[in-house]
Image (cartoon, coloured by chain):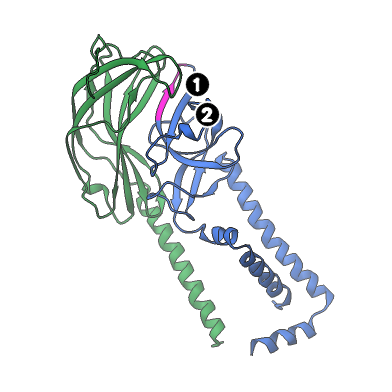
Amino acid sequence: MLQLDFLDDLRRMNMRQLFYQLLNFAMIVSSALMIWKGLMVVTGSESPIVVVLSMEPAFQRGDLLFLTNYEQEPIRAGEIVVFKVEGRDIPIVHRVMKVHEKEDGSVKFLTKGDNNNVDDRGLYANGQAWLNRKDVVGRARGYVPFIGIVTIIMNDYPKFKYAVLAGLGLFVLVHRE
Amino acid sequence: MHTFLSRVNAVSAFSLSTLAALTFGCFASTFLKNYSAPVSITAANIVLKNVPEYAVSREKNDLGALRFDMNSDLTPLFNWNTKQLFLYLVAEYETQNNKVNQVVLWDKIIRRGEASVVSLKNQHLKYYFWDDGNGLLGHKNVSLSLSWNIIPIAGTLPLWSGSGSYRLTFPSEYTQGRSSY
């Protein structure tokens, strides 16, 4: 059975192999991190992948949105933008419904969630009626369903996350290859 | 080789890679697609008032109102990768205050499988047509057009406009009194 195989591997292991396994593990983690940060640089956006919590029926919890934030592209009605209200950390994914842009390029706009009945003025800071360029984290350009569901399960059930990490670590350390 | 775990491993690895390939295929087969369609829009009962917009400030802004007819067949926009269409009617115009003004007056979601022919008569606006200032008075060139955002099953989220817009003109005097809009 499987358990006996593990015990055999443990007996044959020495310090060198242990370090090799640890290094392997660290390599995998750092390459994932490099790809993530590289994506951020290429698209010029703070977080290229956002796990969505509202905007039904277009997006459900756990969907992945690919964002870009190129300064030259103007903000236009109908676009889906991710923005942060000043003073609050939570990014909001909603659609632009009103745009007023001046000759010098300064723009103010209003957003509304597809599933909401009213616009977002109630969500903005006290006294704030419009959003500006600087509030925008990114613009949604692409979409993949369901992928983020693993992250949401990890967040909602932290014990599950620890169990998976512990199991993964144990497996990598003990496995011979 | 043929233990239960290795079989589970092989099956799950294969299904995950197939799913990934299919998802990529959805994206690759539709990101260059042309999603335009002809639309016909007309508007009537155009009213213009100048009243304070309390949600923004104490100042008086132009408030327009109208009823519109719209006809369009959007069936060709639905393909194997279309999950939903988000339609929105946009009024676009230029004023002295702002070079670009875009106001969404009405929107609708058409999901995959629902009726995709739009045929509206004498439709109310869904959202208030506020201007940022007093730029609508006597404006002869407000362009009303229908655009849509394609939400795919997986892939890009393009915005397309219907061909065919309506040129809206506003009266040179405000409508007084409590006329309904």
The picture's colour for chain B is: green
Residue at left offset 40%, top offset 18%: B132
Residue at x 46%, y 62% (from the top left corner): B20
- Nearest to the observer: residue B127 or residue A134: B127
Distance Cα–Cα, label 1 vs label 2: 8 Å
Looking at the picture, how far across and down is residue B140, in whole percent? 25, 14
Asked whether the residues under marks 1 and 2 belong to the same chain, the reply is yes
Pointer 1 residue: A106
For the residues labelled 1 and 2, say whether their Cβ atoms are less than 8 Å apart: yes
Q: For the residue marked with disc 2, what is the amino acid?
A: Arg
Residue A133 is tagged as 2
Quadrant location, the N terminus of chain A: bottom right
Colour in which chain A is shown? blue
Q: Quadrant of residue B63?
A: top left
Indicate the position of residue A38 as horizontal and vertical percent values.
62, 47
Secondary-structure class at tag 1: loop
The answer to whether A32 appears left or right of A84 in the picture is: right
Foreground pick, B13 / A119:
A119
> Disc 2 is attached to a residue of which chain?
A
Q: Residues within 10 Å of mark 1 (few under 14, many from 20)?
A: few
Residue A94, horizontal then vertical, whole percent: 45, 40
- Residue sitting at x 26%, y 36%: B162
- Asked which secondary structure carries label 2, the reply is helix
Span colored in magenta: A98-103
Mark nearer the N terminus (1 vs 2): 1
- Residue A7 location, quadrant: bottom right
Query: Counting other residues with Cα less than 10 Å from the Cα at mark 2, is it few (<14), some (14-19), or many (20 or more)?
Result: some
Relative to A57, does residue A135 appear above or below in the rendering?
above
